[in-house]
Image (tube, rainbow, N blue to C red):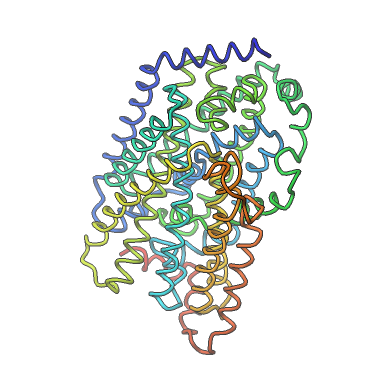
Amino acid sequence: MNEVFGAVHAAVQTAENDPILNISIFGAFVAVTLFIVIRASRNNKTAADYYAAGRSFTGPQNGFAISGDYLSAASFLGICGAIAVNGYDGFLYSIGFLVAWLVALLLVAELMRNTGKFTMADVLSFRLKQRPVRMAAAITTLAVCFFYLLAQMAGAGGLVSLLLGIDEALGQSIVVAVVGLLMIVYVLVGGMKGTTWVQIVKAFLLIGGALVMTIWVLAINGFNLNTLLESAVAASPNGEAILGPGLQYGANPWDFVSLALALVLGTAGLPHVLMRFYTVPTAKEARRSVVWAIWLIGLFYLLTLVLGYGAGALVTPEVIADAPGGVNSAAPLLALELGGPILLGFISAVAFATILAVVAGLTITAAASFAHDIYANVVKKGDVPPDGEVKVARRTVVVIGVLAILGGIGVQGQNVAFLVALAFAVAASANLPTILYSLFWRRFTTRGAVWSMYGGLAAAVILIVLSPVFWGTSTSVFKDTGVAIWPFNNPGIVSIPVGFFLGWLGTITSRKGSEDPRKAAEMEVRSLTGFGAEKATSH
């Protein structure tokens, strides 16, 4: 055991002593992706170009972009680390993230594409009162994007710290700030088109890199999964417990139920994923893109099973826990063990590109929501000059970037998969009930929508603030301080039903005839047939 630890420690020292190689690979990635962004941004003339890439992508291209957007630092760094340390319970994240796509495909993708224009609020306010619904939808969008951004920033800090051997909090904070500044440049220059191309390239690299490492790990174990699992059991202080359920959630199974609800229902309410459906020209292409995304994402999550147990076997959970970046360093350390500093540099650069691409997608979604929904439709009531909306969106990008940097510095050391699960819980509580009611319940009213969004958001955020995420444990935001009032790490088990209940309650207490039945009928026809959608989205 000590020999393995010594070998890995020596290898980490080698990587630390070769920061020039790592920075060179990083620099090459940033240069290539910036070149792509600048090339793609030449045609960004209108709001449709900036927000929806001119609706110029095919289904397969958008499928790669969706998987690039969805396979975030949580999928690569967080899940590999969770499987390496907690085994089976870590793999449950993968299953939850993947199953969630079926909800998005069957219930939401095509209907959203037919009904909306740029943002989720376009759909929610279609047949309801514009201003209160747009305001609520924009606020919930910004909240989900902020939680998701925190996760990516935490991943970036841990990753670059591992590469450059930075243990101090100040050094990691500087890294987070650099990632934030790079992200601001990407989005300001490239808009949705540049961001989409970065996500497509990143999806190829991430799935390709994971495939190479998976084949390598299996080759070491004679292409026998049983041998790999035996090695992981031998290296783990928990022994055979890593092969069965209960290691992480056994003490509190309700916490797992809460997490599962958030993961499975959250995807269909994630604004940055929903916004991707508007970058294709037709509803048929939106469907195709989701099918492509499911295959690509499914393949990747199968690879994480091998990578996670491989990291547990070859690197060992103790070394992973002690490394800079903690649990999030499992995949880079496995790359180092397999292929030395060069593979470590490549895989880390891919993970870095992953973070940049996802962060750019989140930022443009948040900026579009603020500029299109709050500024153009609530403040200016639709009376905006042609370039006014995009100007406000660009300014919003800078503000969001600064907030993300400050938040990312605050959550260093947290598992990124766990932080993303909080974003999923907020999306499932605040957005999903209103989306489903709007699309499928003709009686749904403005009061129902506003109560559902604000109530679901408030329930999720209050429970997160009262939970062990913030108080009472060594991994809390306020470390070893106070006692958590709410016992579960994830609020989904309460906040999601609250969102659905408030949407129903608000609707049945609204006075009859308060909404326009013709608009409800038009929305139903358009969402199911696509009739009128092209006209609405082409100008």
Among all residues in the image, which is located at the extreme bottom? 512
What residue is rendered at 36% in x and 68% in y?
535
What residue is rendered at 56% in x and 17% in y?
337
Q: Is residue 502 above or below residue 6?
A: below
Residue 237 or residue 133, whichever sits in front: 237
- Looking at the rendering, which quadrant does residue 119 occupy? bottom left
Left or right of 393, for residue 10: right
Among all residues in the image, which is located at the extreme front? 482
Residue 89 at x, y percent in the picture: 70, 39
Q: Is residue 226 above or below residue 247?
A: above
Residue 24 at x, y percent in the picture: 35, 21
Residue 288 at x, y percent in the picture: 52, 51
Left or right of 45, for residue 66: right
Residue 280 at x, y percent in the picture: 42, 54
For the N terminus, give its image quadrant: top right
Q: Is residue 214 above or below residue 427?
A: above
Can I make out residue 122 in this image? yes
For the C terminus, give its image quadrant: bottom left
What residue is rendered at 57% in x and 67% in y?
433
What residue is rendered at 44% in x and 35% in y?
156
Instruction: Tell me how many marks there are.
Output: 0
Can I make out residue 102 in this image? no
Residue 539 or residue 338, whichever sits in front: 338
Left or right of 89, for residue 111: left
